Amino acid sequence: MQHAVKRLTMDRHGLTRLFPYSKNGINRDETSSNIRTDDNMKDECSFFGDWLDDKEDLPTPSRKTEEPVNHKYPGMNLSRRLSVASLFAKHLDSTAENEKARNSVIRESKKTDAGTKYEQNTWIKSGACAGFSFGSLSRIGYFPSNSAKRNQDSMISLENCGQNIPLFGVLDGHGINGGHVSVFMAIAIIDCAEKYIWKEPEGQVNGSDMLKTVISHAVVMLTANSGIDLSFSGTTLTLSTIVDNILYTANIGDSRLVAVKIADSIVVAEALSRDHKPGISTEMIRIENRGGRVAPLPGPVGVDTGPMRVWLMDLDIPGISMSRSIGDTIAQRVGVVDIPEITEYAITENVLMFLWATDGIWEFLSNLEAAKICIKTMEELLLKDCHGEHGFFPTEKLPIGSVAEGLIRESTNRWVLEEDAIDDCSTVILVVKPFDFTNAVIT
């Protein structure tokens, strides 16, 4: 297949993906920016291949911390926040070493948004989720030594898998093949969900069982059929569906789902998933019982070397910063598992929106900070667009895409202030009720 430039689209399955633009098999509507793919192109487009990246002059963020450079572990200050930071990276060739860390590149100046590359779906009204609207947005990260890195995040936003049941989620790939893993899993999950719902009698879909079954089958497909080397590559998954006004969520890894509520004009944020980190006592016990070792990157005393990681007992690999992950077969030898944690949440009257986001968003933003950024951004935009008039805004009138952009902009600004590298940042926002803007919300 001929590759010219990379483009992003949301296909009929509701999956945000990058596709190589080719005259063979991918039809581009010349009157719009949408790219349509035929069913027989799904497999061919599952993997991006070696597309030609846009060549841009990218500024390199300067160091903002006053910590001393660690000459014994020269990559520590770049890799300490990344999901995989094996100390064996120095034994790889330069290309593999550059690809290995997190595929985190950001195409923006730390002082201006000029030239920023966003990958997004324009928000759409969800007919299947009556009264709901959603949007998704992703920004590629930054890693100084590799300006050709790819965004390894994937997003799922599908309003109807069947029986008017939606599917929303984010996947955060890591390792050399992490982008391939997250895309393969996203496609497999959507296909499995559609087949699962098709087999169930009308009105009898069990949300919890659906998520468990779909993820289990998709993982089997990844292992048996993908052909991807999973030794040091994998993905997180935070996946949700709504059945009878109950939000069911399956979580693997450190992406996160947060409910944003407004109570008496005060913003409240509630985490609906738990980050799976090796430092959690129950997770650490499982890893150590299976012969693994939990420790941060080594470094000078008193210097922040990042989160706890999973290592083999006698080797400094794989260095993964989460205790649950899809793929990562080396890490799974020592207690990292792909078993999802399932939660159920009743959508009450005071819930305004849900935020699914990869850990690039959450690294330097708390749940409440993220929620307040979303509400404040929405209020500012509504004031501007409505010439200062307050009112009652239905979900289809809310600037969801711009809200997502504001959240990602603030999270990347925090990265620039704290680190030399910047992680990929992606979010899916689902607004489930109209916004009462008769009084300003206290943020």
Image (cartoon, grey):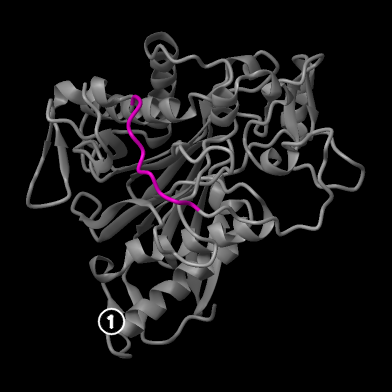
Instruction: Choose top left, top right, bottom left or bottom right for residue 144.
Output: top right
- Position of residue 133 relative to residue 327, above or below, is below
Residue at 57% in and 48% down: 422
Query: From the viewer's perspective, is 394 left or right of 54?
Result: left
Q: Nearer the viewer, residue 432 or 157?
A: 157
Residue at 36% in and 38% down: 53
* Residue 172 lies in the magenta-colored region: no
Residue projecting furthest to the top? 224
Residue 285 in the image: state x and y as whole percent.
Answer: 78, 26
Residue 433 in the image: state x and y as whole percent.
Answer: 33, 66
Q: How many marks?
A: 1
Main SS class of the magenta portion in the image: loop
Q: Which quadrant is home to the C terminus? A: bottom right
Residue projecting furthest to the bottom? 388
Answer whether residue 161 is visible to the viewer in this image.
yes
Query: From the viewer's perspective, is 132 left or right of 147?
Result: left
Q: Nearer the viewer, residue 251 or 66?
A: 66
Residue 374 in the image: state x and y as whole percent.
Answer: 46, 67
Q: Secondary structure at mark 1?
A: helix
Answer whether residue 352 is visible to the viewer in this image.
no
* Residue 51 lies in the magenta-colored region: yes
As shown in the figure, which amino acid type bears the numbered disc 1?
Asp
Specify start and end residues of the magenta stretch as a single range: 49-58
Q: Which quadrant is home to the N terminus? A: top left
Query: From the viewer's perspective, is 383 left or right of 30?
Result: right
Instruction: Kindly identify which residue carries mark 1.
Output: 385
Q: Residues within 10 Å of mark 1 (few under 14, many from 20)?
A: few
